[in-house]
């Protein structure tokens, strides 16, 4: 019985091919290749920095901030672009991120953040959502370039070396400490009157370590 299964499957495939014709099968195969190639090309087109800053909301706000950071210009000449930090490289997480990004496109269409004032009003919400995403995946995009396991603590400054080793021991991830590494942080409620009443609580930036 077991030996008949492959033969039975082969026979069904042959019957299916004979039923619709060899040319039809070849046409479907070629169409599949063309569709996949077109889909993947479109995915990669939306994964370029030029696409990310194609709207003024991004170009005039977070991109302008990013240009003043070490991730944009540094002594080694290595740049981390928008998709390097905000789009996973693995296929399934990348697709999920693209679906999530549709909300950002909707924000563009409806003008939710189409002025600097509106952008600032939503900065904390947008930043918190991205921090949560990076926390959930253990700062995977950061770790594509930086990794605790390969740090040479001997060439780091004393403070950095001590902090990194402590963070590694406590199970922290990059985004726990490095919020604002490439973009301006939202306002913080400093309890100094009405000026910062809509700012984020300090624990948002440095959440307590779970015991």
Image (cartoon, rainbow, N blue to C red):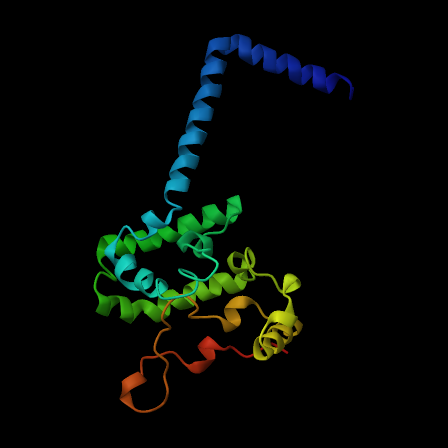
Residue 86 position in % (x across, y down): 44, 56
Residue 34 position in % (x across, y down): 42, 25
Can you name the residue that lies furthest to the bottom here? Answer: 192
From the viewer's side, name the closer residue of 31 and 146: 146
110 displayed left or right of 33: left
Count of labels shown? 0
- What residue lies at 45% left-to-right and 56% top-to-bottom? 77
Above or below: residue 92 compared with residue 14: below
141 displayed left or right of 9: left
95 displayed left or right of 42: right
- What residue lies at 24% left-to-right and 52% top-to-bottom? 109
From the viewer's side, name the closer residue of 148 and 40: 148
- What residue lies at 48% left-to-right and 48% top-to-bottom? 94
Residue 58 position in % (x across, y down): 30, 58
The quarter of the image holding the C terminus is: bottom right
Q: Quadrant of residue 180?
A: bottom left
Above or below: residue 41 compared with residue 84: above
Q: Is residue 35 visible?
A: yes
């Amino acid at each position: 019985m077991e030996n008949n299964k492959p033969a039975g499957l082969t026979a069904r495939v042959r019957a299916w091919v004979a039923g619709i014709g060899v040319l039809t099968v070849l046409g479907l195969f070629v169409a599949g290749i063309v569709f996949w190639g077109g889909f993947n090309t479109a995915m990669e087109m939306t994964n370029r920095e030029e696409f990310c800053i194609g709207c003024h909301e991004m170009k005039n706000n977070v991109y302008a901030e990013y240009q003043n950071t070490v991730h944009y210009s540094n002594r080694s000449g290595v740049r981390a672009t928008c998709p390097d930090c905000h789009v996973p490289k693995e296929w399934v997480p990348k697709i999920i991120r693209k679906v999530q990004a549709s909300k950002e496109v909707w924000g563009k269409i409806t003008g939710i953040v189409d002025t600097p004032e509106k952008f600032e009003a939503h900065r904390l919400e947008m930043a918190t959502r991205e921090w949560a995403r990076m926390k959930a995946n253990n700062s995977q995009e950061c770790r594509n370039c930086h990794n605790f396991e390969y740090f040479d603590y001997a060439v780091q400054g004393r403070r950095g070396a001590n902090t990194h080793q402590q963070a590694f021991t406590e199970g922290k991830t990059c985004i726990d400490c490095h919020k604002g590494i490439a973009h301006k942080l939202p306002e913080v409620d400093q309890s100094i009157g009405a000026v910062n009443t809509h700012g984020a609580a300090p624990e948002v930036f440095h959440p307590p370590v779970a015991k």
